[in-house]
């Protein structure tokens, strides 16, 4: 099928060549014509303008000076001048021999065509809903390895989060999360092909070896993108049905254009990444958990003071002539991370050929990307081969096809989990060990058997980086073939068959002596996914007087298949022979294996009616009915409608001339949503005990009467353009209600079913989106400045659940987490409660009540005692793009601001508890520097600062050494000034307290034991940040012989300018993708929690060259 | 035109192709990944219940319960084990087993397999019994019905312990009735992980559990307990030999099916953290208990009192009496090799200069509830992951994966005979207390492979029966090694052995129950609230009534254990 599609255009090409030979025999060349073409805006010449003799394939393109010369064939020739972004012009040649032309830029706002549902191009002004648009050129200067990243900060209402470095998953959420169970990712449609993408592409094979294999949309080649449309609300997306509940991202790839000569485009870019900002770990003390003790097996950095000339026997101390180890000086190695990481290099090379003959258009492109990661040995490669062609079989019948082949692969993806195979984290294992000494990671003579590390309970980072390999190969084909038939001027039909499939093969190798899998491991996983769609659509268009009518009707059949096969060593079993990675090298009773498959189908019919009146009033109506295989027969069919209205008021009234456009719009829509396959009837699970396989009854209670989820939304908006469209404004208010949510909720396990699928509840979200654009500078000598600002504020609320449930748990960690009660906002973050004085009349109101035996905080585990410490959603987000052009130069910048919201950093939970973080040392109140009386006075002078726990700090008094205010520590062994106590009160009788503020009766304990480990509030921080998403400078090179245009740019990306938390953690990465976690409702990803995302911030530097021949 | 014609054909073919490939939507949604519950064979469900029940009970008895009754202490990650900072404790794992068990019962009834029903009744009682023992009131009559309509099923009410124990005993009686017929038809022996389909052994197990639960009620319902125990004793059907102990063997292939502290899977950190408690080991050393070397290992390095020493302690260790300069310790591995090669390691200290005594024994335990257990006995390599050369570890058996003494133990002949000894000691009509006591000890020694030591041991002062309940329970406490949960329940009922919590415990008395977990508090808050209101608050009230020191029904008004 696809083979035929590939062949057809070449046949067509051959045929057209044949006929052109005949043509030349027939017609005598009559005349030549030439001229210069300039732009009205800046008066500069326009290179690359297509000049075509109408009705023929005879044409040319202007050179760098804007000059063209064309030999005419016909006698009554008409020339068509066309150029992207400019109004096309037709001029009859008559007797002229020179035609100079000043071309005018397309009036962007008024006639801009945007691609809407089902690939229908519409004038933007006629739409009753908001569509975000990003043009391929807007991101031309900057190379992104994942196309989605280019959307960050560019479209109001769209939030983009990349979870880690290059190759990791990127989440995109439109208008906030509306579903609590899914990953809320929009549907991606590339050239009409719905393609699969999900965030759950994470798997842990082997002990704590969590690897993010990247989401599948990264297979799309960013260089192929012509434009991206973001269909935000259900109004825009209603025609896509079930899967459009989270919005739709329509990607149109570059194609050949009619009348265009053959153009070869080459581009090449290199991006170098350098780490710039690290965690604030102190490197002041060696491993060990009391001052003066070196213990290389300890996770604490609370041992011998470093860089003080103190010597000790270390793991690699030399052996003297007497056979004894010689103590060596203890120094800190603050640059370990910098020295461990390699420069990240990403090279992308791309070659594309586009062109046309009189009956065909074609494009053939090849791109390869290769990336060497910051973590040594990590990499990522991608090859994309794309082909698209259009062929006019007859005047009425057109065939077009797009085929994308991609291969993504890596020899080693870095693991990102917690305290396992995360190489970056293990760099922070030892403060006193020089990373360069770890470079040889095998014990001599014990290669593949025993790693070489300062202690046997922690891994050498080089061993993780080079020894543990998580490879994958993903082969993907996305393609479609479309037949268009024009029955008459008014009636069109098309039939499109599309297919998207990939096979991903993963292979994980873990050598002997990995601390979480001492005997190593070997794992294989193969995933296959395929989706096919067959779509038919007929459109009838007619103008009746002032009325423009258009009706469409169509049908679609979708089929999905999924298969997952896994085989590997069981935990702890590992390999028989070290270093041999084959399944046959695993003990037979130690092989784990599983496979599963699933299918899903949705059949649909849909219709669309558009009414336009006098180019000023537009009404769109859509209707769709789906039949989904995943729902029970009685509820399987669901219908949903949408309506939208657009009114161009300045055409109706006589408004001042400065108002170029005033438009009001409103949209109302409903979208249904089905569920995943096999979600209505339970089957038995399988488990094993040795070789005995047995059945288990599932604890997740399914619902055999599931009805589809219904998402109802409306939006209103106003667009206002002023001063000849130099200032543009778009404002939208939206409201969505997601009812009948198909939710996996937790229930009491004593009911036998700790989770159950409910089909109830309602989540509402509402928000504002504002876009403001302007061109404050636009002058004749070529200087122009464009600024676009977008602003989004939204809130999502849990309006109701099912009977008896008042609460859902998005994720749960350390008796806190993201939990929402009915009536509250989604995203609230909680921390475990502690006993505190509740009586507002008490002088100790809000002070913590400490234990009478230890003087430490007492956990209060009651549900109502949990402390609400924030919400993971921002108050608002803002993006700004500016483009400054001067002649052949352009400077582009894109900023992204997030204000408000909180996140919890579990990196700092571990880092603080292990006494590594500088932050928590600095937070200690240096009690030892005061007398007892002074200290009491100080603490009581501001209890809110010195006594009462707050976000980011539970107050503690003392220090680690005498000089830093440490207190004499009665439990010390020789070293007596690392004492710390917790300020608060101790209850002596109900309602009666004694102060615990130092002096006699105060429980002083070693500093390193006094970390509020049980309270997430300690590590809750403000998530606000400002990023410079992109900064680039481009230059169009002067004419080079044979090359029609050359553009070079340098750029940088994702520069974090400011974070409110200021702890070296990117708040955007407080976003954990997990496999299923017991107890979480949204088990795909956890928002608002950051865990061991310890890769430093980087400033990439890129260089890109674009050439067109 | 030709092309058009062929295209028409092509379109027709495409539509046909789609029509054919459009399976019925019902068919598409048939799950191929598992068998339907309606076809489940009851045999295939047995391991789902029996395996997890045995694993859970062993994880408790060798885990935090061993710390609670002061069999062991941990010197890293120790707050739960040593000082009962348990936080909230969910029971999801137990009710998960019960869900499978309920389904086993239904399938057994549907298929008319009585023997399987007997197993389901026994396991139901064992599991609910354990739940109420640990937590107190719990959902019982309304439990496990979440798949029935109605909020009362979705959010089950809690029953009082009294109701649960009554149900446990009734179900066990019903199961005993079934097993007494000796009919095991329908069983596939390998799926019965405990008894391979032996009905008589199931009968003994069931009756032994009855003895356990009657005795549990001895304070609250003495007459009922007495009558029940006397009745079982009359039947003579209960565990009465060490090889009748109800146990499950480990497979030893991977982490999930091996002994929990097996060093093959975690580089030994779980094993290394566990240390004997002075409370247990010192008492056993006093009575020269032959089980000591089975369970424990001598210290790598013994302290030696040396009044001639001019410093308070040797800065370095001595190998065969000679100081090794610069050496404060070896790693565990090196010690084991060198000691096996015949070397002896010591360190000298001068108590007069140090100002206190160190433990100079060959076997050294850690006192309960220390603030920093890893520092105990002047450990030079203090830290949460480092071996303490001056404190005993568990014997090398406990590094293994499976086999030998590594079994998940559910109930033993020894326990049963301690129960009978206690009943007789109370004057109930179940024979002679001393006979049962002696048998209980004999079975225990046999279980731990030191049966030949029985004759000497039983006559030893402190071991020879003195007629007291205290002594019976103390011996039962020793015999409950790795099944410490039962010992905790005995302590709660009798106050023996008189355990005292360590200094760093948040309260001055031992804990007596598990707290209700987050799962019920979050999602069944009204019902769990009712149950919490029925607890008797004693200590730890600042944390609310749902704490580990509040008394549940079973010990309310008994004056025990404190």
Image: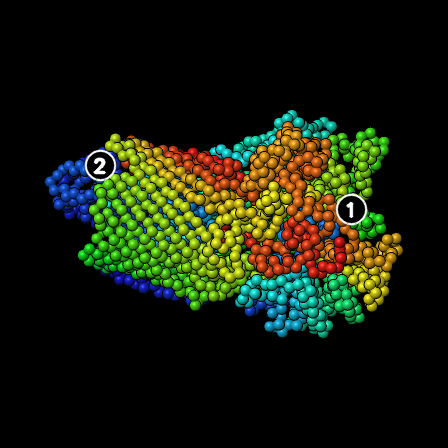
Q: Is residue A423 above or below residue A644?
A: above
Colour logic: rainbow
Residue in front for this viewpoint, A890 or A730 = A730
Q: Could you say which disc has been placed on residue A1019 in the image?
A: none
B488 or B274, nearer to the observer: B488
User: Secondary structure beneath disc 2?
Assistant: loop
Can I make out residue A357 in this image?
Answer: no
Residue lying furthest front in this view? A841
The x, y position of residue A1077, in whole percent, is: 55, 52
Determine the residue located farthest toward the top in the rendered image.
A309
Callout 1: residue from which chain?
B
| Residue B6 or residue A952, whichever sits in front | A952
- Label 1 sits on a secondary structure element that is helix
- Marks 1/2: CA–CA distance: 95 Å
Residue at 34% x, 58% y is: A642
- How many labels sit on residues? 2
Which quadrant, please, contains the C terminus of chain A? top left
How far across and down, in percent of the image, does residue A472 sit? 49, 47
Nearer to me, A1005 or B438 = A1005
Q: Is residue B367 left or right of residue B107?
A: right
Q: Eyeballing the image, is A118 above or below B117? A: above
Residue drawn at point x = 49 percent, y = 65 percent: A704
Residue, disc 1: B278
Side of A347 relative to A18 (left or right): right
Residue B248 x, y percent position in the rendering = 70, 59
Q: Residue at x 81, y 61 (%)?
A: B422
Task: Give the number of the disc on residue A40.
Answer: 2
């Amino acid at each position: 099928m696809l083979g035929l599609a590939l062949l057809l255009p070449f046949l067509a090409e051959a045929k057209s060549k044949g006929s052109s030979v005949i043509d030349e025999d027939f017609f005598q060349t009559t005349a030549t014509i030439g001229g210069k073409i300039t732009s009205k805006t800046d008066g500069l010449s326009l290179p690359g303008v297509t000049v075509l003799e109408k009705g023929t394939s005879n044409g040319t393109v202007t050179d760098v000076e804007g000059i063209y010369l064309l030999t005419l064939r016909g006698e009554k020739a008409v020339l068509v001048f066309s150029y992207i972004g400019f109004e096309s012009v037709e001029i009859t040649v008559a007797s002229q021999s020179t035609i100079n032309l000043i071309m005018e830029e397309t009036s962007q706002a008024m006639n801009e065509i945007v691609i809407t549902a089902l690939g229908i191009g519409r004038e933007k002004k006629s739409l009753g809903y908001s569509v975000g648009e990003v043009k391929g050129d807007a991101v031309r200067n900057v190379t992104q390895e994942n196309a989605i990243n280019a959307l960050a900060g560019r479209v109001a209402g769209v939030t983009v989060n990349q979870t880690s470095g290059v190759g990791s998953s990127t989440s995109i959420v439109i208008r906030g999360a509306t579903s609590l169970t899914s990953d809320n990712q929009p549907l991606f449609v590339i050239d009409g092909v719905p393609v699969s993408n999900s965030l759950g592409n994470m798997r842990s094979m082997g002990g704590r070896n969590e690897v993010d294999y990247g989401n599948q949309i990264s297979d799309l080649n960013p260089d192929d993108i012509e434009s991206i449309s973001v269909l935000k609300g259900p109004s825009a997306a209603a025609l896509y049905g079930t899967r459009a509940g989270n919005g739709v991202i329509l990607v149109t790839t570059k194609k050949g254009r009619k009348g265009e000569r053959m153009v070869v485009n080459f581009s090449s870019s290199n991006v170098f990444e350098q780490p710039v900002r690290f965690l604030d770990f102190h490197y002041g003390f060696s491993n060990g958990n009391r001052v003066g003790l070196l213990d290389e097996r300890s996770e604490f950095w609370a041992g011998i003071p470093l860089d003080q000339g103190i010597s000790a026997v270390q793991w690699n101390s030399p052996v003297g002539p007497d056979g004894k180890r010689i103590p060596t000086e203890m120094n800190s190695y603050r640059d370990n991370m910098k020295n461990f990481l390699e420069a990240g290099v990403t090279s992308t090379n791309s070659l594309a050929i586009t062109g046309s003959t009189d009956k065909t258009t074609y494009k053939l492109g090849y791109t390869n990307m290769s990336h060497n990661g910051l973590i040594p040995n990590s990499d990522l490669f991608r090859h994309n081969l794309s082909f698209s062609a259009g062929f006019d079989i007859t005047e009425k019948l057109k065939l077009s096809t797009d085929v994308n082949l991609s291969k993504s692969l890596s020899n080693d993806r870095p693991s990102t989990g917690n305290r396992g195979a995360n190489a970056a984290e293990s760099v922070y294992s030892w403060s006193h060990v020089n990373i360069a000494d770890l470079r040889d990671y095998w014990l001599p003579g014990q290669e593949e058997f025993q790693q070489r590390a300062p202690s046997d309970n922690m891994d050498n980072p080089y061993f993780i980086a080079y020894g543990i390999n998580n490879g994958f190969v993903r082969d993907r084909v996305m393609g479609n073939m479309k037949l268009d038939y024009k029955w008459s001027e008014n009636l069109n039909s098309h039939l499109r068959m599309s297919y998207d499939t990939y096979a991903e093969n993963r292979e994980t190798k873990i050598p002997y002596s990995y601390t979480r899998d001492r005997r190593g491991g070997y794992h294989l996983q193969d995933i296959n996914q395929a989706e096919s769609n067959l779509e038919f659509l007929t459109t009838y268009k007619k103008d009746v007087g002032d009325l423009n009518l258009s009706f469409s009707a169509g049908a679609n059949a979708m089929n999905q298949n999924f298969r997952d096969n896994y085989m590997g060593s069981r935990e702890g079993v590992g390999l028989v022979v070290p270093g041999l990675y084959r399944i046959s090298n695993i003990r037979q009773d130690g092989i784990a294996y599983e496979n599963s498959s699933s299918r899903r189908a949705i059949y649909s019919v849909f219709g669309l009616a558009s009414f336009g009146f006098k180019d000023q009033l537009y009404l769109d109506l859509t209707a769709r009915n789906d039949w989904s295989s995943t729902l029970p027969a009685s509820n399987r069919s669901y219908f949903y409608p949408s309506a939208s209205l657009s009114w161009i008021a300045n055409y109706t009234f006589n408004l001042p001339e400065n108002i170029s456009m005033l438009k009001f719009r409103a949209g109302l829509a409903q979208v249904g949503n089905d569920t995943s396959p096999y979600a209505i009837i339970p089957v038995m699970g399988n488990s094993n005990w040795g070789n005995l396989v047995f059945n288990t009854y599932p604890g997740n209670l399914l619902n055999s009467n599931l009805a589809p989820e219904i998402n109802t939304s409306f939006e209103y908006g106003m667009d206002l353009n002023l001063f000849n469209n130099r200032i543009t404004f778009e404002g939208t208010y939206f409201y969505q209600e997601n009812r009948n949510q198909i939710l996996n909720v937790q229930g009491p396990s004593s009911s036998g079913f700790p989770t159950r699928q409910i089909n109830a509840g309602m989540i509402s979200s509402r928000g504002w989106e504002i876009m403001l654009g302007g061109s404050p500078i636009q002058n004749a000598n070529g200087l122009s400045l464009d600024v676009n600002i977008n602003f989004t504020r939204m809130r999502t609320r849990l309006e109701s659940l099912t009977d008896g449930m008042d609460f859902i748990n998005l994720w749960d960690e350390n008796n806190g987490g993201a939990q929402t009660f009915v009536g509250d906002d989604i995203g609230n973050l909680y921390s475990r409660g502690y006993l505190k004085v509740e009586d507002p009349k008490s002088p100790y109101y809000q002070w913590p009540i400490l234990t009478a035996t230890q003087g430490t905080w007492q956990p209060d585990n009651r549900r109502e005692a949990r402390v609400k410490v924030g919400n993971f959603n921002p108050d608002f987000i803002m993006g700004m793009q500016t483009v400054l052009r001067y002649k052949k130069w352009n400077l582009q910048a894109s900023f992204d601001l997030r204000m408000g919201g909180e996140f919890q950093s579990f990196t700092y939970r571990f880092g603080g508890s292990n006494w590594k973080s500088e932050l928590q040392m600095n937070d200690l109140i240096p009690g030892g520097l005061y007398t007892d009386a002074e200290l009491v006075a100080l603490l009581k002078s501001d209890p809110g600062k010195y006594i009462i726990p707050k976000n980011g700090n539970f107050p503690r008094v003392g220090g680690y050494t005498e000089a830093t205010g440490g207190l004499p520590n009665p439990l010390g062994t020789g070293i007596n000034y690392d004492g710390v106590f917790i300020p608060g009160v101790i209850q002596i009788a109900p309602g009666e307290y004694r102060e615990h503020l130092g002096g006699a009766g105060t429980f002083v304990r070693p500093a390193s034991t006094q970390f509020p480990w049980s309270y997430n509030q300690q590590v809750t921080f403000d998530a606000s940040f400002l990023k410079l998403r992109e900064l680039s400078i481009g230059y169009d090179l002067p004419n080079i012989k044979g090359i029609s245009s050359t553009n070079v740019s340098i750029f940088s990306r994702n520069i974090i300018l400011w974070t409110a938390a200021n702890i070296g953690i990117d708040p955007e990465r407080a976003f954990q993708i997990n496999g299923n976690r017991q107890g979480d409702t949204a088990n795909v990803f956890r928002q608002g929690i950051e865990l061991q995302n310890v890769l430093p911030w980087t400033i990439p530097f890129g260089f890109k060259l674009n050439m067109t021949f | 035109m030709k092309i058009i014609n062929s295209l028409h054909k092509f379109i027709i073919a495409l539509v046909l192709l789609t029509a054919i490939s459009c399976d019925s939507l019902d068919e598409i949604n048939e799950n191929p990944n598992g068998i339907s519950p309606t076809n489940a064979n009851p045999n295939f469900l047995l391991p789902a219940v029996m395996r997890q029940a045995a694993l859970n009970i062993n994880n408790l008895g060798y885990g935090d319960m061993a710390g609670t009754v002061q069999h062991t202490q941990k010197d890293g990650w120790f707050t739960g084990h040593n000082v009962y900072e348990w936080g909230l404790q969910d029971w999801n794992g137990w009710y998960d087993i019960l869900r499978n068990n309920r389904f086993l019962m239904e399938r057994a009834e549907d298929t008319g397999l009585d023997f399987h029903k007997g197993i389901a009744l026994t396991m139901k009682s064992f599991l609910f019994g354990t739940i109420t023992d640990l937590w107190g009131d719990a959902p019982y009559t309304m439990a496990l019905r979440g798949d029935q309509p109605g909020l009362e099923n979705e959010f089950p009410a809690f029953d009082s312990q009294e109701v649960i124990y009554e149900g446990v005993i009734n179900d066990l009686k019903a199961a005993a009735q079934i097993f007494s017929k000796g009919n095991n038809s329908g069983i596939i022996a390998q799926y019965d992980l405990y008894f391979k389909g032996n009905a008589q052994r199931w009968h003994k197990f069931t009756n032994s559990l009855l003895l356990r639960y009657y005795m549990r009620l001895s304070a609250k319902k003495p007459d009922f307990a007495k009558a029940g125990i006397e009745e079982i004793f009359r039947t003579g059907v209960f565990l009465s030999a060490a090889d009748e102990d109800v146990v499950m063997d480990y497979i030893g292939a991977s982490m999930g099916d091996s002994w929990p502290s097996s060093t093959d899977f975690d580089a030994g950190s779980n094993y290394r953290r566990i240390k004997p408690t002075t409370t247990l080991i010192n008492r056993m050393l006093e009575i020269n208990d032959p089980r000591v070397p089975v369970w424990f290992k001598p210290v790598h390095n013994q302290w030696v009192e040396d009044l001639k020493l001019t410093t308070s302690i040797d800065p370095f260790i001595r190998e065969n009496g000679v100081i090794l300069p610069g050496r404060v310790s070896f790693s565990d591995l090196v010690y084991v090799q060198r000691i096996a090669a015949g070397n002896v390691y010591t360190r000298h200290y001068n108590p007069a200069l140090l100002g206190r005594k160190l433990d100079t024994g060959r076997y050294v335990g850690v006192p309960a509830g220390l603030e920093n257990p890893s520092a105990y006995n002047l450990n030079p390599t203090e830290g949460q992951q480092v071996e303490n050369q001056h404190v005993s570890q568990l014997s090398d058996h406990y590094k293994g994966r499976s086999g030998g003494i590594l079994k998940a133990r559910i109930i033993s002949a020894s326990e049963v005979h301690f129960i009978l000894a206690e009943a007789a000691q109370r004057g109930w009509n179940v024979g002679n207390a001393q006979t049962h006591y002696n048998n209980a000890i004999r079975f225990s020694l046999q279980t731990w492979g030191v049966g030949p030591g029985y004759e000497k041991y039983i006559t030893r002062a402190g071991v020879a029966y003195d007629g007291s309940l205290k002594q019976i329970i103390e011996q039962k406490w020793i015999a409950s090694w790795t099944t410490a949960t039962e010992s905790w329940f005995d302590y709660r009922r009798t106050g023996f052995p008189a355990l005292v919590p360590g200094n760093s415990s948040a309260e001055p008395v031992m804990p007596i129950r598990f707290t209700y977990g987050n799962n019920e508090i979050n999602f069944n808050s009204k019902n769990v609230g009712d149950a919490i209101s029925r607890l008797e608050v004693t200590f730890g009230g600042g944390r609310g009534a749902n704490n580990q020191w509040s008394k549940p029904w079973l010990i309310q008004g008994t004056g025990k254990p404190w």
